[in-house]
Image (cartoon, rainbow, N blue to C red):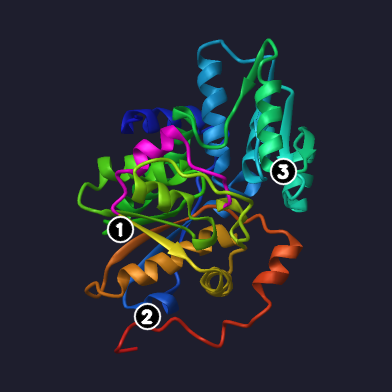
Amino acid sequence: MISIADIEAAQVRTSSIVKETPIFESRLLNHWLGHQIYFKAECLQRTGAFKLRGATNVLAKLHEQNALPEQVVANSSGNHAQAVAFACAQFGIPVSIYCAEGISPVKAAATEFYGAKLHCFATREEADLAVEEASKAEGTLWIPPFNHPDIIAGQGTVTLEALQQLEERSVEPTAVFAPCGGGGLLSGAIVASKARLPNAEIVGAEPLNANDAARSLQSGKIQRLASKPDTLADGAATPSIGEHTFEVLKLVDDFYEVEESQIAYWTQWLQHLLKLHIEPTCAMTMAAVAAWLADKPANQKVLVLLSGGNISQASMLKIWQSDYLTQPPIMNPDA
C-alpha cells in the first residue's frame, strides 16, 4: 500500500509537467446548502483531467532511474489515454492506446493529437486482451489506468495539493469527496487525507448503474460488471476496480451509489454555478455530498474533487434532455 511519502515524492517529480489547478467556490451554493463546499478543478488540468498526474508520475519515476521504456501501451476509455499520450510526448516515447469503439470522439481526437496511435475494438474486454498481448513485446511498458502504486501516488497529488491550498486559507475540511471508477483518484485521496486530515471523513461515489466498487466493498471481494454499463458518468464505467485500489478503498469512510437523474442534475447545476465545463463523472459526486450533509450540523467544510472536463456532444445532449435548473438544491432551512 502506498504512503503519503509516495504522494509527496510524486508531487515533486511531476511538478514540471503537471500544473497546479485552482479551487473554486459558489457563494450561492454555499448559501443554499448552509455549508462551505470547495471544488478542486482538475477539469483545468492539462489534457482536461487528473489522469495526467498518475501517468506522468510513472514515467518521471522511471526517468529518475534511467529506465524509460522504448515504447508505451495503455488501455483507456479516454482520459487516461490522453494523459498517457501527453506524458509520453514529454519524454519522447512512442505510445499506442487500446480502447473500445465507444470511446468519446472528443477524447479520441485529443489522444491522437498528442501523438498516440489508437487501436479500437468492439468491446472493452477485447481491448484489454489486446493491450496485454502488446505489452509482452520487448522494451514495452504497459501503463494501466488505475491499478498501479505509482498511478495511485500520482493521483493522490490532487488531494495533497488541494489540502495545501486550503491550509494556506486556514481551511480544514471535515470531509473529502471523490468519484470512483477504477479507484485511483479515490485511493489517492484516502491516503493523502488520512495522513494530513486524520479526523476528516473520506467519501466516494459511483453510478448506481456501474456499482462494481460498492458491491466489491460490500462483499469483501472484487466484483466485475457483467456488461458495459449504461451511465452518463463514462469515466466511472470501468469493468472493475483493481487489487491495488481495492486494498486502499477498504479504508473509505462512506460510499454512495448515484442514480442517473442525479448525475444529470448536478452536472447542470455545477456547470451553471461554477461556470466550469465539468464531466458527469465528477458532478455525480455532489449527489453524495448532498446526501452526506443532510443530517450534519451547519457550516461543514467539504472538499470535492472535480476529476475532469472532457465531454462529448452526445453526452451533453443526454445531460440536457431535461432542464433541472428550475429545481435549486436548497437544503438550508434559513435560506
Residue 270, horizontal then vertical, whole percent: 53, 70
Residue 183, horizontal then vertical, whole percent: 46, 44
Q: Is residue 252 magenta?
A: yes
For image coordinates 45% across by 66% down, the residue present is 286
In the image, which is nearer the foreground, mark 2 or mark 1? 1
Label annotation for residue 40: none
Dots 3, 2 in contact, CB < 8 A: no
Residue 8, horizontal then vertical, whole percent: 37, 32
Choose between 269 and 101: the one closer to the eye: 101
Q: Earlier in the sequence, mark 2 or mark 1?
A: 2
For image coordinates 58% across by 34% down, the residue present is 17
- The answer to whether residue 211 is visible is yes
Per the rendered image, the range of residues in magenta is 237-253
Q: Earlier in the sequence, mark 3 or mark 1?
A: 3
Residue 294, horizontal then vertical, whole percent: 30, 75
Label annotation for residue 31: 2
In the image, which is nearer the foreground, mark 3 or mark 1? 3
Q: Secondary structure at mark 1?
A: strand
Label annotation for residue 175: 1
Disc 3 marks which amino acid? Thr
Residue 247: image quadrant is top left
Mark 3 to mark 2 CA distance (whole Å): 45 Å
Relative to 250, 326 lies left or right: right
Q: Secondary structure at mark 3?
A: loop
Relative to 129, 257 lies left or right: left
Q: Is residue 242 above or below residue 24?
A: above
For image coordinates 67% across by 11% down, the residue present is 139
Mark 2 to mark 1 CA distance (whole Å): 18 Å
Q: Mark 3 — residue?
A: 123
